[in-house]
Image (cartoon, helix red, strand yellow):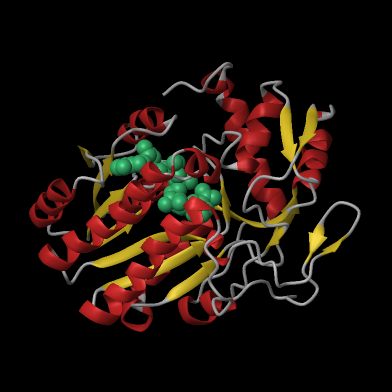
Amino acid sequence: MKILITGGCGFIGCNAAQRFMQLGHSVTVLDNLSRRGSVKNFAWLQTQGEFEFINADIRNAERMNQIVSDGAFEVVLHLAAQVAVTTSVIEPREDFEINALGTFNVLEAVRKHSPQAIVLNASTNKVYGKLSDVQVEGEATRCKLPALPNGVGETQPLDFHSPYGCSKGTGDQYMNDYARIYGLRTVNFRQSCIYGYRQFGVEDQGWVAWFTIAHESRQPVVIYGSGKQVRDILFIDDLIDCYLAAIERIDRVSGMTFNVGGGPDNTLSLLELMEKLRQHSGRGVVHSFEDWRPGDQPVYVSDIRKAKQLLGWQPRVDINEGLQRLHEWVGRNLEMFASPAIPA
Ligand SMILES: NC(=O)c1ccc[n+]([C@@H]2O[C@H](COP(=O)([O-])OP(=O)(O)OC[C@H]3O[C@@H](n4cnc5c(N)ncnc54)[C@H](O)[C@@H]3O)[C@@H](O)[C@H]2O)c1
């Protein structure tokens, strides 16, 4: 297949590109290289196989039309985004232009020039907001949602919270609607926390990788809130399996939305991650506490039963195995994370 990956030099994108190349697909990577670490990922990707690279910005509608029209892609994996809630609060217009308008540009380009293409969209659990109407209970190291033992399902009411929630939610809804109105073959993945190789986690985004990188490179971390926030975490390889399952079953799942994460069997709080890092290294994580950040959910766990049922997919890498793999990658590449900033 001919596959276009927008944001293909990001964390998820470069891992997806590597896998698609290994499977023998023809891969085109589009990225504006704005994310810290994306140039490093691009350089690494060049060691992994042959692919076409396009340095472009999804905000440029004309350019996106041209690229999709020239490319004759069978699959578009749309990952390019402004990814941090914190940045979206500081720069809401830029966040809107990349996530809402940029996603719209991708869809319009496909509608006009490649309407048979499968479009996979990386949406987010943030479209469900803070889940304020769901009762939260606190335990010693974590919060939990006693009323939702299987996690949050796709029927949970949408509640866009934070500019990032609004902009990603807009893209998410356009994906659904372009399937309804124009018959495009779109699939939305409302992803929880993804972690793994080549994730240049920073304080604002990618907390599992950020805590691991910071601890290994002896930088302190700040806990915003109680530290009992819980997420279901999903290892990168499992997410890509999920994308592949959707491509294989597109006739069945076109136009659908799936909550995708580690599910109830793979949950972790910030305090628990710090304890795992302490056990691994034999020294405590240097940390301090600050107030909660806007829109932060005390608990989010994906109900992945729909994905299991319709995609025949479930996570295979458990937390301990996944954290071990992340740790090894960080340990082998410590020079890349040298303070004060991760190089481009
Ligand atoms: N990583 C997670 O835990 C997670 C969770 C939920 C949703 N998501 C979504 O998955 C997608 C990929 O996330 P990631 O973790 O790989 O992020 P990332 O920041 O590592 O990758 C995003 C890539 O998009 C590129 N990009 C940004 N703006 C662009 C623009 N205007 N034009 C072209 N390229 C641009 C960046 O340079 C970067 O390489 C995003 O849409 C994100 O919202 C990620």
Image coordinates for residue 254, horizontal then vertical, percent: 33, 78
Q: Residue furthest right?
A: 140
* 280 to the left or right of 27: right
Residue 278 visible (yes or no): yes
Q: Is residue 11 visible?
A: no
Tell me the residue at 77%/77% (across/down). 147
Which image quarter holds the N terminus? bottom left
Residue 279 on image: x %, y %: 83, 36
Determine the residue positioned at 79% across, 26% down.
286
Quadrant of the snapshot with the C terminus: top left
In the depicted structure, whether residue 215 falls above or below residue 315 = above
**Apparent side of residue 273 relative to residue 54 in the rendered image (left or right):** right
Residue appearing at x 50%, y 76% in the figure: 312
What count of labels does the image hold?
0
Q: Is residue 115 left or right of residue 127?
A: left
Nearer to the camera, 309 or 108 = 108
Task: Please tell me whether residue 316 is drawn above or below residue 207 in the rendered image.
Answer: below
- Say which quarter of the image contains residue 110: bottom left
Q: Position of residue 239 (x, y in %)?
A: 49, 58
Q: Is residue 279 above or below residue 242?
A: above
- At x 35%, y 63%, the residue is 120
* Residue 173, quarter of the rendered image: bottom left
Q: Position of residue 86 (x, y in %)?
A: 55, 41
